[in-house]
Image (cartoon, rainbow, N blue to C red):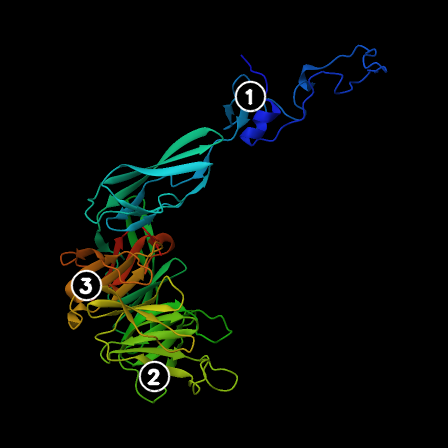
Amino acid sequence: MRRAPLSLTLLVALGLPACEASNGDENETDTPGATTGEDGTGDTAPTTTSPSTTGPVDCIAGQETCACLENNCIGTLECVEDICVPGPEYDIPDDPIRVIAGLRVPVDSEILADEFSWAQTGGPDANVTGIDTQSPLIDVPAGASGGDVLTFTLTAIRNGVEATADVTIEIVEANFEEGLPMIMDPEQLGTPNTVSFRGGQLWAVMNEGFVSWFDLEFDDELQEEFAVHMGRHEIPGAPFGARMGQVPDRDDDIDVLLIANAGNQALEALTINGGNIETLSDETVDAEPLGAIRHLVQMDGEIYMTNGEGGQLLVWDPSPPNDDEGGTTGGEPPIPAGTRVLLSDLVMPSAVITGPEDGFLYLGVAGEVLRVPILETGEAGEPTLYLSFGDNADPNLLVDGLQFDRANNLYAGVPLDDRLIVARYAAGEETEVIRDIDTAGANFSDFGGLRFGDDNFGGATLYYGNASGRVGRVFVGLGG
């Protein structure tokens, strides 16, 4: 049976807008054809009232904040105390989140509710950060096995309506495999030191002195992937580290491949369209050679490089932060444009990347990853230890690949020890090894220039170069 509409008091108590109502009492509302005498009674002419005009004005039964229609409402609205109200709304991952064990995994959600809660309802026990927030962070246990499923249940309440939904995290094994299947010609794929991505294509820099780029396609008949060689540019010397970008302090917007050429002891830029090579720097401002630079990264208009044999972190700065009077922003003598040594006496510095925080570099050295602040003056601040995983005097523990994912999990590749190390993010302090994956039997364990793929190469898959002459890859589940 249909119940009477709620009173104004109850509507206000529920926080719902009240509709103006006409209850047929002519002492309160004049109706068409009615006259009222001085004594308040008067004579009323007969009127015909359509049933559709009785009840709340501009309120159609079954619509939001209106009376229910025989205990039912339109669409997803719910009938609460004979009023149609919206229940909780949420946008959560529909498909299982597939990741390797040990990662910190964000549950990206949007929730519209008066109150909500998360609870783990299945799988190996996991620590949760921000359990009372819309997007909690799940620390997947490092010991979880492939095939394990962690389930987290959202319970949300809005306008008295309760709803539940599940988010699942599926654990997959770390499978190290061929990144460019079917490419066997050494003229196309030599010894790849590092990889980069541009426009859905993988660019691999070869130690033999060239760069090739590849596409990845799928054979529907054979149900397998295969790579296609798309082109090649010559790079004389022994190019090692490389990244896509543009030459700093220029307005030409020309895309280049920035190259740390260990053989030429030079920082170079290769024009993507045309293959022209420009030497940006081959000596420091003190006229010293750059040495066998291996890795580089661009940040805030400067290019940072590592010289492993020389134990140095260098920066090429075409426009130092000097003030109007010729000094630095700190009032010191002016910094000359060019390449400067920022840090020295490091043990096998190699991979270098930008971090989650502005103005910091993360630098791989023997057995450690350092956090290096870059000051407003352009100089490097005192490095602090971010991650330790072995003897910091052992050159076999050099880090040849570093990469953060979108949840700031850090991956560190240690090629001479056949290890891929995983660590969760710690803001402003030292972190710890969460997983130490032994890759000795994987045949893809050099981790030269770890990079996340793009487009059809899979944004949640790490790619890297190998001295074996192959490009390796491993699906980890979270992209950059």
Sooner in the amino-acid sequence: mark 2 or mark 3: 2
Tell me where residue 221 sits by quadrant.
Answer: top left
Q: Nearer the viewer, mark 1 or mark 2?
A: 1
State if disc 1 and disc 3 touch (CB < 8 Å).
no
Which secondary structure lies at badge 1? loop
Q: Nearer the viewer, mark 2 or mark 3?
A: 3
Q: Position of residue 80 (x, y in %)?
A: 50, 24
Residue found at the far left of this picture? 441
Residue found at the far front of this picture? 39
State if disc 3 and disc 2 touch (CB < 8 Å).
no
- Disc 3 designates what residue? 389
Which secondary structure lies at badge 3? loop
Q: Residue at x 37, y 56 (%)?
A: 454
Q: CA distance from mark 3 to mark 1?
A: 64 Å
Q: Residues within 10 Å of mark 2 (few under 14, many from 20)?
A: some
Q: Look at label 1 and name its amino acid.
A: Cys
Q: CA distance from mark 1 to mark 2?
A: 78 Å
Residue 282 shows which numbered tag? 2
In front of the other: 379 or 261: 379
Vertical placement of residue 318 versus 43, above or below:
below
Residue 225 shows which numbered tag? none
Q: CA distance from mark 2 to mark 3?
A: 34 Å
Sooner in the amino-acid sequence: mark 1 or mark 2: 1
Task: Tell me if residue 65 can be seen.
Answer: no
Tell me where residue 60 sits by quadrant.
Answer: top right
Sooner in the amino-acid sequence: mark 3 or mark 1: 1
- Please tell me how many numbered marks the rendered image carries: 3
Q: Position of residue 14 (x, y in %)?
A: 54, 29
Q: Residues within 10 Å of mark 1 (few under 14, many from 20)?
A: many
In front of the other: 360 or 299: 360
Q: Position of residue 273 (x, y in %)?
A: 43, 69
- Disc 1 designates what residue? 68
